[in-house]
Each structure stands twice: as C-alpha cells, then as structure tokens.
Image: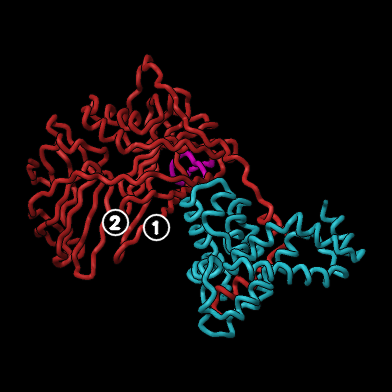
Chain colours: A cyan, B red
Amino acid sequence: MDDGAILELFFARSESGITELDAKYGAIFHSLAYNLLGDREDAAECVNDAYFGTWRAIPPERPEKLCSWVCRVVRNTCVDRLRRRGAGKRGGSYELALDELDGCLVSPENVSDTVELNELTREIDSFLGSLSEENRVIFLRRYWFADSIADIAGRMGMGEKAVSVRLTRIRKRLREYLKQREVYV
Amino acid sequence: MRAAERFSEALASADPKYIEEAATYRAAPRRNRHILRIALAVAAAALILAFGTVGVASTIYGMNMTDFLGMLWRRGTGGDMSPGQAAAVESLTQDVGISETAGGVTVTVTSARASGYDLWLVLRVEGVEFESDERYFFADSQIDLMPEPVIEGPGIAGTNVTYQGVDGDDAGLFLLEYTTSAAPETNQELGVALILDNLMRGEYPDEQLVASGPWEFDFELKFTNEDVSITLPDTTVPAYSPDSGEYGEVTLYDIELTSTHITFSYKDQGGLIPATYIYAVLASGEVVSTSSGSGYADDSHVWHFRFPWEYPLDINDVAAIRISYLEIPVS
C-alpha cells in the first residue's frame, strides 16, 4: 500500500492504518528502536508507543514523508526512555555512536556561545547536503539510526573497515565544517 | 547534557528527505568494481625511455605492481630485477581493481603494495589524451587508514603521486606513495580511503584543469609485515645542525633492515641531523636508494627514523648499506 493510502486510513480513523504502517515499515521502526535501546521488549514497547503517538497526531498532521516522520517519533520515544534509564544503564550502539560524535564536536568557552538547537539542525542539514548520497546515508545510519558498523557495511555493500574509514573521514569533515562556521555544541 | 547528546537531538530533526533516504537506501552493486587483469602486451614497440621527475615519456605494458616496478627498475638500471627481488615485490603486491568515474575520466586503483602502513598504489587513468612530454598531477590526494596510524609524539604522514607515462592503451599511469612515521599494528587488515582531487597538467603558474574530481575509493588490503629483518651494528655517521651550521657525528643504533625499509634511532645531540643519503648496495653492484622517509622524537629526545626503499629488496641480495660515505657490510 502506498503512503498516501495509509494516511487516508489514518484520516478515516481506521485502525488498519496502523496495521498497514507496521506491515510496510515495521521492520525499520523495530530495528531503529532495538539499535537505540539494545532490548527487544523495550524496543517493541517503544514502537507501540510511537504508533499510538502517530495515531493521535494524524490527523491533523499529514506528513510528506511518512516513513521518516514515524521514524522520528520512534527515535524520540526511545531517546526519552534512554534518558529515564540514566547514563550508566544505556550501553548499546547508540552510546557508542555518541562517544564517536563527542570527539568531533567543539565545546564553547562560554555556555552563552552554544548554538541554539534549531540553528544547529539547520547547520546539520546544510552539512548533510554537502555530502555525497552514499556518505550521507552512512553518516545517518550510524548517528540517526544507531546502526552497527557491520549492519551499515551490509546495507552499503562495503567492507566494515571501509565503513569505519568513511565514518572517520566524515566526522573529520563535520568537525572542520562546524569549526569553520563557529558552531559550538 | 553532553555535546554529543545535544548534537543527536538536533540531528533528530534533520530534513525528513535525508532520513527517508537513509531509511530506504539500498546499495546498487558496486560501480565498476572489478579486477583488471590486462595481459601483458608483447613489447614489440620500442620503449621511449626518459628520465626525470616529470613528463616521463615511455610506454608501460601491464598494470600489476610487479610489472610496473619491474619496468621502472629496467628504466633505472637497464636490467631485470633478480628473481629474489621480483619475488619480494610479488609477495607484497595485491590486486585492487576499483574504478571511479568523474568528469568523464575513470581512475582505477589497479594494484597495491603494502608494508605496514606504507602503501604504494598504481593508478590507471582513462579518458584523457595524455601527451608524452607533459606533467600531470592530482591537485590533492588524501589517504585515511583504518586502523588509524597512532604516532607517539610529533609525527608525519604524506602522499606523493607521480605520473609515470602511459600504458599500451594510452591510459595514464601514476604511482602513489604513502608513508608515515607511525608504527603499524600487526596482522590487521588495512582499510584505505583515498580521495584524489582534480587532475591537472602543466607547470606552476600555468597549470590547467584536465578533469574535475574528486575520485573517491574505499578498499581493504591485507596487512603485510616482513618476517625477515637484519640488525646492523651501531654506526657513527656524519651529521649536521641546520640551526647552528655545525658539523658533527651521531651514533645510529637499532639499525634494522627489511626488504621494504630501513629503520634506526639516535639520541638528539644539539640538533645534529645525520646524513640521510641511504642506499642498499646489492651484490650485483646495483644501488637502491630510499624513496622517502619520516621520523619522530620521543619524550626522551630519541629520534626514530624509517626510510622505505624505492623498490622492495631481496634481503639476501644486499651486500652493504651505505649511509653517506660509510658502508656497513651486511652479512
């Protein structure tokens, strides 16, 4: 079923909208939640919560990109749960991904110099736009979807070493990009 | 909230079109990924030999690193490598065979020679009418390795790409050398990411763009680590201090010779730098120089140097090492 038809089911308040959404994109949502949480049960709960959130939001929302819109709901739900868990109990590839990112971000000398979150998103969008499609996907699969290196390698048809090298290079580029624009996180 | 979490939060709201792209992306089969095995053409045509660093006008048949270095060796010496030396080159050679096309020009990394972190790559460039007496070069070349070279103290790493003429199909051939003062971690596959920027021709300041890059490659090489090395006795060699202009001597120790490089250490003595004209003198009388070199000083002010040979050697062929005017016999 195409996305437009799924949306129409939501607008008609038909619960089969959720069934169709799950049939089409459920694997993506579950994999995202599991990457972030590292626990199947928690992941399933978060995906269900996200479906409920989607049900409540559509209508009136009519997302242009249904998959990425719901992915964001899943991600936010999972990150909220991670925060509740506390830093010590996180683990998983999300934490690893955060560790990798830490090394390429520049902290400000004064807190007041920290960039606003929406401004940071604009800068990130601009950075993503400067990457090749392949590099953009690798970057987002690692830091948005929290995929393992092995999973990214499988998806991209590359070796794991090649993916690691590529990520190192993109992080370097990101650091230079943010530094040049004086974007402090 | 730590910086990475804040970044992650901002990233969560990234443009949905990028998230959709990443969520649904499926890689196409790797473009032009194939092993090139071009048969050696019969060398019926006379080779036009020329020497010098630029505009090397010669026809080179065959793309493999072994053939390629064999040809360069013949250029320099007029003879063939010894069977042992050819075997040493062969043992370090790996096929790569990855092509990337940009601006109508296809660059292929055909073959590699790896020793620790030191790399030599043969690049084949199609889609350009190369002129024999012209200088061609890439505006920039960048190599990233995984695992990343870890350098204790200040260290260096760099690439050098030289145009070496054309092959039998008029494709341009380039030799890329990468060297670093970092010590390698052993037995790990080496992930290589190479970016070549615009292909240029001519001499400064009249350089012209031939083709717009970049050409980007990602590939893996097997780690090759020589298991045979010869340790030479400590040797005192002439040295010079660029700061004071004074001459003196330093004693090199831990001098170790392998088929691909020579390493040594010395204690810093008032900024004296040892003569770094280093050659391997072969039993046949041929002399092989070092192609580049790098070094670093550790916290104890001890310098550690590493110089790759211009060509891999059969270590059994080496009769002596010449450092400046001193010859150290190799038994």
Nearer-the-camera pick, A48 or B310:
A48
Left or right: where B233 falls relative to A73: left
Q: Amino acid at mark 1?
A: Glu
Mark 1, Cα crowd under 10 Å, few <14 / some 14-19 / many 20+, is: some
Residue B159 drawn above or below residue B97: below
Secondary structure, mark 2, is loop
Does the stretch in magenta take in A130? no
Mark 2, Cα crowd under 10 Å, few <14 / some 14-19 / many 20+, is: some
What chain is tagged by disc 2? B
Range of magenta residues: B198-209
Q: Quadrant of residue A119?
A: bottom right
**Residue B235, position as x, y percentages in the image:** 8, 53
Secondary structure, mark 1, is loop
Quarter the C terminus of chain A occupies: bottom right
Residue B140 drawn above or below residue B94: below
What chain is tagged by disc 1? B
- Read off the residue under disc 2: B183
Q: Earlier in the sequence, mark 2 or mark 1?
A: 1
- Read off the residue under disc 1: B148
Nearer-the-camera pick, A106 or B30:
B30
Does the stretch in magenta take in B200? yes
**Residue B156, position as x, y percentages in the image:** 33, 58
Q: Residue at x 43, y 49 (%)?
A: B192
